[in-house]
Image (spheres, helix red, strand yellow):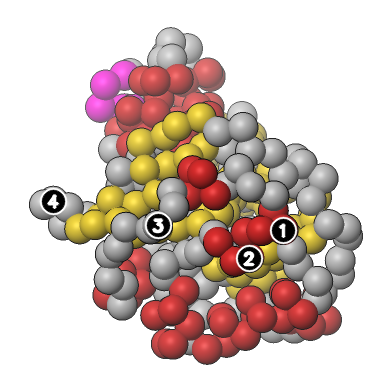
Amino acid sequence: MICFPNAKINIGLNILRRRPDRYHDIETVFYPLAGCCDILEAVRSDAYSLQLSGIGMECPTEDNLVTKAYRLLAADFDLPPMQIYLHKQIPFGAGLGGGSADAAFLLKKLNDSCSLGLDTASLQAYAARLGADCSFFIRNEAVFASGRGDVFSDISLSLQGYWLVLVKPDISVSTAEAYAGVTPRLPHRSLQELINQPVETWKDTVVNDFEPSVFALHPLIGRIKQQMYEAGALYASMSGSGSSVYGLFRQETHLREEFKGCYYWAGYLS
């Protein structure tokens, strides 16, 4: 079985408060990027193994989310041994959820190929045990996320037909580093309200609370966002707590030459 786990972007990210469990309550919108994806294949074998290619990852097999996803289901079901091939194309440390997507897609494929009979809610519950945003990729549809980023509400947002340019410099921002510079606050208007306004208004209203501290530590990331606007983006933002920046454009825009040395992806949204 082969599948193509896709990335996601965050549209807005408000950090509301610190929780007693040391996590934070947030509000954000997760939006899938169908064309920006890894390649994952799993075949029955004599023993479990994970083979990686593509973008380099310094991660022991047992620490990889794909392995953790397999082990999670294997603890409750009689899964056959699998040889898994993962070709990484989504950069890590970028706020794009690539590792979470890989794990969630494996859960879905194992459920189908091994006839486990798990419904969407059950798959989401398993995925949530792997990471806060992992369960988003089970449905893989635009959602308003709250709590730790694991409580989802349906939204009617569609960006179909917009052109998206995604750029990641050779910088990785850890979640701990990003949170260290943020003071939680309650916004004047909920993101759930703002996201229903025209995309053209988002520049002045929809914010990512990580940006001020991350831009101060890594000015290049802030300059990339500014370049997006100079190139005509209707809206530009850092995605999540990572180092990637995306711009939404009304029409096809080619900026690869502007961002040499960076990871670059562009395409129409669906």
Q: What residue is pinned by disc 3?
A: 188
| Image depth: mark 3 or mark 2 in front | 3
Q: CA distance from mark 1 to mark 3?
A: 19 Å
- 4 or 2: mark nearer the eye: 2
Point out residue 209 in the picture as x, y percentages from the top left corner. Answer: 41, 67
* Tag of residue 21: 4
x then y, percent, for residue 29: 51, 47
Q: Which circle's residue, 4 or 2, is located before the other in the chain?
A: 4
- To which residue does mark 2 refer? 203
Whether residues under marks 4 and 2 lie with C-beta atoms below 8 angstroms apart, the answer is: no
* Residue 75: in magenta span: yes
Instruction: Assess whether residue 50 is covered by the magenta stretch.
Output: no
Q: Is residue 260 left or right of residue 194?
A: right
> Residue at left 33%, top 28%?
125
Q: Amino acid at mark 2?
A: Lys
Which is more toward the observer, 90 or 237? 237
Name the foreground residue: 20 vs 134: 20
